Image (cartoon, rainbow, N blue to C red):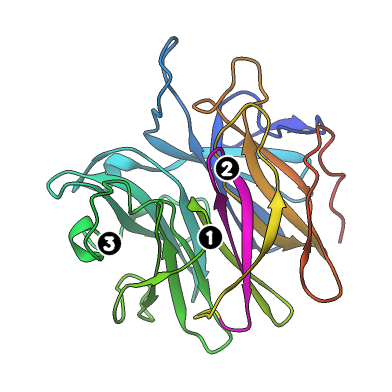
């Protein structure tokens, strides 16, 4: 049963649970926020993430929590680890790309789940991994398949972008659950992880965790397929947290940056919390660097 929480208290926006790695979707004038869920026991400084959470809002101030729509264990071929993800809508279905640890193939993998409504429940769309470690160019990095992001361009072509230390890109078939063609590498300076692709006007933007600890850097292109030109730093290292994962979206005529920090009591790099601040563009399409605030954003009105 959904229930209301978190009214107008600024950043972080979710305060009763630790939330990380935002991905956002607008459907029927409602914004859906999907997050990772940090649950390390007391005294443990490591990533312990087993499920994802879902919140919705009509104004970005009042948030409603929904039952967890997806767990790492919902992928029968996965052994756990609910890392960063991306939810996207196509043809009235909702596709959720998520990074998990594979049960039988060494290394991280990306699964895809599907639902008929944004709050789920979501179920494994394939019964096996969309991307596994043996599919990418040879690498010793067992965490290479992290943090997927996806977009559908103006021609209806869908793309998946992901990676850790190396950024990978592949086309998706129209069914959204199969790769269409080769897996390519996108060359980006200081690429760490946490990729996010979005479009504004005639420009595509690929933002990502830059360096370690992570700022957010971004590249621009006229085409979702690239080539990408590195453009600059979007924001600095977040408070009390070494990682940084952006989600950028327009809602009711205004652009927003979702990210996480470690600002809650007891928080840190393994106990993170989602925040929102305004995002603005220069006339030439570049992004004005975002200053992270404690006050967050005001109510979004249409």
* Residue count near mark 2 (Cα–Cα under 10 Å), binned few <14, some 14–19, many ≥20: many
Left-right relation of 158 to 218: left
Nearer mark to the viewer, of 2 and 1 = 1
Is residue 211 highlighted in magenta?
Answer: yes
Residue 270 is tagged as: none
* Residue count near mark 1 (Cα–Cα under 10 Å), binned few <14, some 14–19, many ≥20: some
Q: Which residue is mark 2?
A: 214
Is residue 7 highlighted in magenta?
Answer: no
What is the spatial separation of the Cα atoms under label 2 and label 3, in whole angstroms?
A: 25 Å
Nearer mark to the viewer, of 2 and 3 = 2
Element under label 3? loop
Q: Position of residue 18 (x, y in %)?
A: 56, 27
Magenta span dominant secondary structure: strand
Left-right relation of 284 to 90: right
Q: Name the outermost residue toward the front.
A: 189
Figure label count? 3
Q: Position of residue 238 (x, y in %)?
A: 66, 36
Are the residues flagged by discs 2 and 3 in contact, CB closer than 8 Å?
Answer: no
Q: Position of residue 139 (x, y in %)?
A: 24, 56
Q: Which residue is mark 1?
A: 189
- Residue under the point 69% across and 61% down: 232
What is the spatial separation of the Cα atoms under label 1 and label 3, in whole angstroms?
A: 24 Å
Q: Which residue is mark 3?
A: 131
Q: Position of residue 108 (x, y in %)?
A: 28, 48
Residue 202, above or below 200: below
- Residue 100 or 269: which is nearer the viewer? 269
- Segment tinted magenta in the rendering: 205-223
Q: Name the outermost residue toward the top.
A: 43
Image quadrant in which you'd find residue 197: bottom right
- Residue under the point 67% across and 48% down: 258
């Amino acid at each position: 049963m959904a229930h209301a929480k978190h009214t107008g208290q600024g950043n972080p926006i979710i305060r009763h649970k630790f939330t990380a790695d935002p991905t956002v979707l607008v459907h029927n004038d409602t914004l859906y926020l999907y997050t990772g869920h940090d649950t390390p026991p007391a005294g443990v400084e490591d990533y312990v993430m087993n499920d994802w959470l879902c919140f919705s809002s009509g104004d970005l101030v009042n948030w409603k929590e929904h039952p967890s729509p997806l767990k790492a264990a919902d992928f029968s071929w996965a052994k756990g680890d609910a890392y960063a993800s991306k939810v996207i809508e196509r043809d009235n279905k909702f596709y959720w790309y998520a990074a998990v640890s594979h049960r039988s193939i060494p290394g991280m993998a990306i699964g895809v789940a599907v639902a008929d409504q944004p709050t789920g429940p979501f179920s494994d769309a394939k019964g096996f991994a969309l991307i596994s470690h043996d599919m990418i160019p040879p690498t010793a990095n067992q965490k290479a398949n992290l943090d997927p992001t996806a977009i559908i361009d103006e021609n209806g072509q869908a793309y998946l972008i992901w990676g850790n230390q190396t950024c990978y890109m592949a086309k998706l078939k129209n069914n959204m659950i199969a790769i269409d063609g080769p897996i390519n590498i996108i060359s980006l300076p200081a690429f760490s992880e946490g990729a996010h692709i979005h479009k504004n006007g005639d420009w595509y933007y690929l933002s990502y965790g830059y360096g370690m600890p992570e700022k957010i850097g971004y590249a621009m292109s006229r085409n979702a397929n690239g080539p990408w030109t590195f453009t600059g730093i979007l924001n600095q290292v977040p408070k009390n947290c070494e990682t940084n994962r952006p989600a950028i979206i327009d809602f009711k005529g205004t652009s927003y940056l979702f990210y996480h920090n470690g600002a809650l009591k007891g928080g840190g790099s393994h106990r993170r919390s989602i925040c929102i601040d305004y995002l603005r563009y220069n006339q030439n399409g570049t992004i004005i660097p975002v200053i992270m605030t404690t006050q967050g954003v005001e109510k979004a009105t249409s």
